[in-house]
Amino acid sequence: MSEIFTKSMARNIYYGGSAFFILLFLALTFDTSIALPKRDHRENITPQVAQGKVVWEVNDCVGCHTLLGEGSYYAPELGNVYKRRGGGAFIKAWIKMMPTNIPGRRKMPQFNLSEEELDALVAFLKWSSEIDTAGWPPNIEG
Amino acid sequence: MQYSSQSVAKPYFIAAIGLFVGQILFGLIMGLQYVVGDFLFPLIPFNVARMVHTNLLIVWLLFGFMGASYYLVPEESEKELHSPRLAIALFWIFLIAGALTIVGYLLVPYARLAELTGDSVLPTMGREFLEQPTITKVGIVIVILGFLYNIGMTILQGRKTVVSIVLLTGLVGLAVFFLFAFYNPENLVLDKYYWWWVVHLWVEGVWELILGAILAFVLIKVTGVDREIIEKWLYVIIAMTLITGILGTGHHYYWIGAPEYWQWWGSIFSALEPMPFFLMVIYAFTMVNKRRREHPNKAATLWALGTAVMAFLGAGVWGFLHTLSPVNYYTHGTQITAAHGHLAFYGAYVMIVLTMISYAMPMLRGRAAANSNKAQVWEMWSFWLMTVSMVFITLFLTAAGVLQVYLQRATENPLPFMVVQDKIALFYWLREIAGVIFLIGLVVYIISFFVGGESKEEAAA
């Protein structure tokens, strides 16, 4: 780089640019926080939904599945599974019958969830399927 | 080695390499489980192997960053480390806490681990990359604070250079953003929004400052180019990193419930994110071409150049590939993401740690400026084996991802996830073969440490 562009100019761009974009990011975050309630429908987060999120977490579901596209790519997307499977009955039955006995097929462990935990998980997945995700995923297969 | 306290870096580097081996072994297990679904089931379910694979990566990179800091900071500050004893104590605390966590993942069902560690008091577990029990997270904070105190005191009491200040900024940022790991609201959208403040603002933010500082240090040492020139480049690169990377966070906010305007902010700024990596390539090659000395450690120079090139490809090119929101609409959460993740982490962070180890380890082992020619030849073979096989892992995952996107998302009659996975199994097999070659490269890397011969003194050019 030429002598016209000095180290102190580079330093000023670094400090000034970073500060500016941190502030802009915080401003956008503030605006997002205001916009979110209409998109995430937080009024529907019942204690059961909250319990379902805990069940989701303590069994590390995200270690195989994606939820709104984030997680692991080993097993199907679950953000829209409630809609794909037409409700909670299939989801509960599926979890209960794990692991499948098909040799060589990817295996989901048996988590021995109680009815209460299963219902909570379903409530959480139902709530998740109602988040306004800007039209993602492209189709019902996730 | 100019300061005796730099020697605390050695156990950090050895631990890093040891955990790296573990990471790769579990990667191979997962890779096989992709095609032989019941492999090691129910002994090691896929999610457990994945936790071990990703958590070991994070922990060994942290060991690498800490080791690099302990080596670099005394030399930059022109004084001994504030407390070598604290550094060694923290090493053992971190290693034991890390090992216990991994053993916990492997021996106890995850839900039981959550129960045993009292996750319900402050639930933070079960989120990608942040699977550690809350008490482990607290341990990580304690270790990082002690480390920052040690490094910070050394820097503040000694000579302050751009390299050490940028490194310190990156490390403080690492600590600050990790605190968001403790924020886990009931609302999934908020959870995800701030989860990225740990993950994105680490790897596409403050970690790049750490990378830049380490690379600048090694380039100053191996090329002998005037510090002023290298520091100017460093400022420009990290300026571009933060200017593009902070709002680049938006590329994670397209489909998780955040407002649609993030599709604009995220697409525009993350399209610019390859720029600092491109600059890094030009800078690394320019500095090596303008070198004013012939450093005998050719392997370290190779790793340094390799870091710049592979970081540009993995983080820059493969990131850009799927970062524009209309593209990401189809690729989000597919094997394309996995392809990018592998090459970016290897190219940027694995390689910068191996660069520093390559440069520092001969001196830490009392071998003058560089290993023997023979040892360096082994090390360079490992460079090519690991780097080329990682490129192939990335290409195979990309091919798998393109097919997955087509069959499952971008076609008239989308197929279910598991049906698609069966159809693209060939590419998972090829990926696994490339993974085995990577492991061979890693074995060659370790062998290189045990190859003797006359070590090389530094000679003036």
Image (tube, coloured by chain):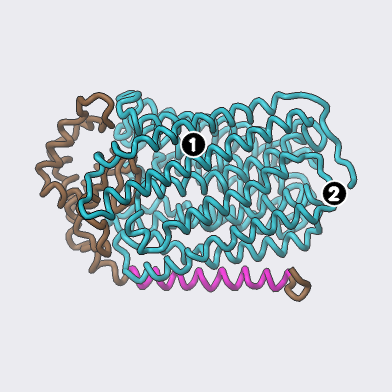
Chain colours: A brown, B cyan
Residue nearest the observer in this picture, A75 or B324: B324
In the rendered structure, the residue with mark 1 lies on which chain?
A: B
Q: Which quarter of the figure has residue B258?
A: bottom left
Instruction: For residue B175, say whether it is visible.
Output: no
Queried whether the magenta region covers residue B290, the answer comes back as no
Dots 2, 1 in contact, CB < 8 A: no
From what the image shows, is residue A100 above or below residue B119? Answer: above
The residue under the point 31% across, 29% down is: B37
Q: Which residues are magenta?
A: A7-33
The residue under the point 53% across, 40% down is: B390
Q: Position of residue B314 (x, y in %)?
A: 52, 50
Residue nearest the observer in this picture, B47 or B63: B47
The residue under the point 35% across, 34% down is: B34
Q: Residues within 10 Å of mark 2 (few under 14, many from 20)?
A: some
Give the residue pinned by disc 2: B293
Query: Helix, strand, or loop for circle 2?
Result: loop
**What is the quadrant of the N terminus of chain A in the image?**
bottom right
For residue B11, the mark is: none
Residue nearest the observer in this picture, B34 or B361: B34
How far apart marks 2 and 1 lie (CA) works out to 37 Å
Return the residue found at the far bottom.
A4
Tag 1 or tag 2, which sits nearer the N-term? 1
Q: In the visual, does A123 lie left or right of A137?
A: left
Q: Amino acid at mark 2?
A: Arg
Return the residue found at the far right.
B460
Q: Amino acid at mark 1?
A: Leu
Queried whether the magenta region covers residue A28, the answer comes back as yes
Q: Position of residue B460 (x, y in %)?
A: 90, 45
Query: Helix, strand, or loop for circle 1?
Result: helix
For residue B56, the mark is: 1
